[in-house]
Amino acid sequence: MCVIRIHFTADDLARVRFAPRPSPVPELHAALMMLGSPEPLFGRWRHRLLRSLPRTVEPLADLAPGGVAPAFLDVLGDTPDEGFTLIRSARPEFVRAGIEQVYATRPAPPWIRALHTGNADAWRTLGRAQRSAYQSVLAPVWPLVQDLHRAEFARYALTVTEQGLGPALTALAPGSRLRDGIWEWPLPGVPGVREIRLDGRGLILRPTFHWRRGPLVQDQPDRPAALAYPAGTGLPLTPPRRDPTDDPLADVLGRTRLALLRTLDEPHTTTDLARRLGVSNATASTHATALRTAGLLTTTRTGRSVHHTRTPLADLLLSPPPGPDDRQSPTRYTGRGGPALPGRDRHSTASDTFSDRSPPP
């Protein structure tokens, strides 16, 4: 049994935050790692994607031999372009260290060695491979990922508001516990204890809807640690085909409360809300109270009038998610030297980075 232990200081507990939007590049890496998983439950999903992956993705297999990828790929970013730019801006010594890490026992291909010298052709090869992988694997389901993330964000916010940070954290990882400033996350797999010390940097929480194993931790010096945890119902994700009036937030808040929030594009009284929603004043008041407790609306009294107003958190939940503007035409993948897996050696514990290191269940 492996145990991940995340050590919080008082400052860290004040700096825990939930990513307001999904990050395309690490979600892409999670999908590519699951693409190499032997688990039969994902066989049809894997088979479909492997048939559609373009040849231009093949260099990712060179970059991640045996499913081990260099740490300079561990980036966030709100759009594909932002994430790929962060990868390209990695310091040469960081790129070289990452390449030496994954090619410690074998010679790296020439184009891989050329990355840390800043060779433009090598970086174009990597950028083209990652963009092609994104377009084929993630772009078709990105709207669904955005919807799922918004619902997960709302669920977390409600738990924090109603129960506090501790229960909200442990709810993300069934079987985990927060005690004496240490979040312990037991995982079946290789034995050992993996210690992550935040030391005041804080922690960013991010759900991932492709990775189905343990947490993925991005832990680089002088940056907040980022933890991606498996969320949702599991693979396969398929492009959404639903009534456009459906909203995943309704599953979290309830349709009446969601409609109430949408009505508050300007302040309204309880009577106004009841009339617009077609419910009684008492029902409207009950829903407003629940949303106020969750931090999604505020109530102010002016004389004999009571007005309800949405909070910035509610505006964030209701705003349409920004779609990545990086759209390129898909091509085809044949695979060379194993699947393209921007991951880490599952048995390595020497460093803590995004793609590492979550032992298999």
Image (tube, rainbow, N blue to C red):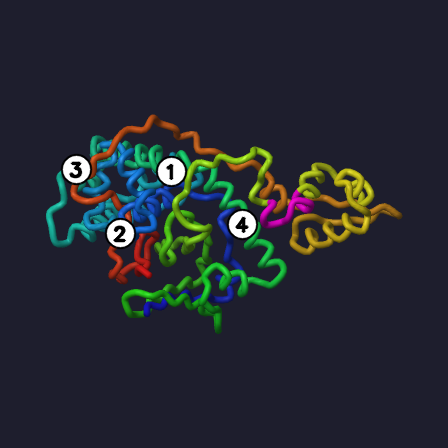
**Mark linked to residue 38:** 2
- Which amino acid is tagged 2? Pro
Residue under label 1: 138
Q: Position of residue 347 (x, y in %)?
A: 25, 61
- Circle 3: is it few (<14), some (14-19), or many (20+) Cα within 10 Å? some
Q: Position of residue 37 (x, y in %)?
A: 28, 50
Q: How many angstroms separate mark 4 from mark 1 (CA)?
A: 20 Å
Q: Earlier in the sequence, mark 2 or mark 4?
A: 2
Q: Determine the residue positioned at 77% across, 38% down.
A: 276
Q: Position of residue 301 (x, y in %)?
A: 82, 49
Disc 1 and disc 3 in contact, CB within 8 angstroms:
no
Q: Earlier in the sequence, mark 2 or mark 3?
A: 2
Q: Earlier in the sequence, mark 4 or mark 3?
A: 3
Q: How many angstroms separate mark 2 from mark 1 (CA)?
A: 20 Å
Disc nearest the viewer among 1 and 3: 1
Residue under label 4: 153
Which secondary structure class fits the magenta region best? helix
Q: Which stretch appears magenta?
A: 250-258
